[in-house]
Image (tube, helix red, strand yellow):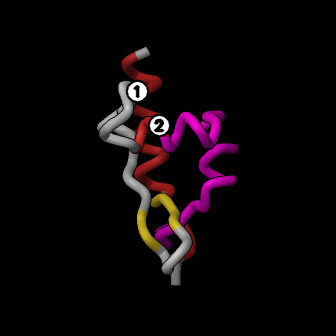
């Protein structure tokens, strides 16, 4: 199997490290009731009963798009 095409799931510490965004801000952006809600931020994926992750490809795409508009 080609590992470069494998789907990678990032847990919260890796998302924080990769984006440079704090945990509180990430969850604020994910909350539709928050005035800081950001519908463009990638949605978390449920991995188990108490764990979530984000697709690395979606985080990368979001970062690329964000860098193009800034």
Q: Quadrant of the C terminus?
A: top left
Q: Residue at x 39, y 40 (%)?
A: 41
As rendered, which of 31 and 64 lies closer to the eye?
31
Furthest residue toward front: 33
Q: Which mark is residue 36?
A: 1
Label pair 1/2, CB-CB below 8 angstroms = yes
Within 10 Å of the Cα at label 1, are there few (<14), some (14-19), or many (20+) other Cα atoms?
Answer: some
Estimate the x, y position of residue 67 in percent, counting from the top left: 46, 24
- Residue indicated by mark 2: 28
As rendered, which of 31 and 62 lies closer to the eye?
31
SS assignment for the magenta stretch, majority:
helix
Mark with earlier residue (1, 2)? 2
Furthest residue toward top: 70
Compared with 4, 68 (above or below) is above
Would you say 68 lies left or right of 2 here?
A: left
Would you say 18 lies left or right of 34 here?
A: right
Q: Is 6 inside the magenta-drawn segment?
A: yes
Q: Is 38 inside the magenta-drawn segment?
A: no
Within 10 Å of the Cα at label 2, are there few (<14), some (14-19), or many (20+) other Cα atoms?
Answer: some
Q: Residue at x 38, y 53 (%)?
A: 43
- Region of the chain picked out in magenta, as a range: 5-27
Q: Residue at x 62, y 42 (%)?
A: 23
Q: Secondary structure at mark 2?
A: helix
Q: Which mark is residue 7?
A: none
Compared with 36, 29 (above or below) is below
Estimate the x, y position of residue 18 in percent, counting from the top left: 64, 43
As rendered, which of 5 and 34 lies closer to the eye?
34
Estimate the x, y position of residue 8 in percent, counting from the top left: 53, 67
As rendered, which of 45 and 10 lies closer to the eye?
45
Compared with 8, 25 (above or below) is above
Estimate the x, y position of residue 46 in percent, counting from the top left: 43, 70
């Amino acid at each position: 199997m080609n590992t470069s095409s494998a789907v990678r799931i990032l847990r919260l510490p890796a998302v924080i490290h990769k984006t440079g965004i704090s945990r509180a801000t990430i969850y604020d952006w994910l909350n539709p009731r928050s005035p800081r809600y950001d519908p463009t931020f990638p949605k978390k994926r449920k991995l188990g009963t108490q764990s979530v992750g984000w697709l690395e490809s979606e985080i990368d795409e979001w970062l690329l798009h964000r860098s193009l508009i800034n």
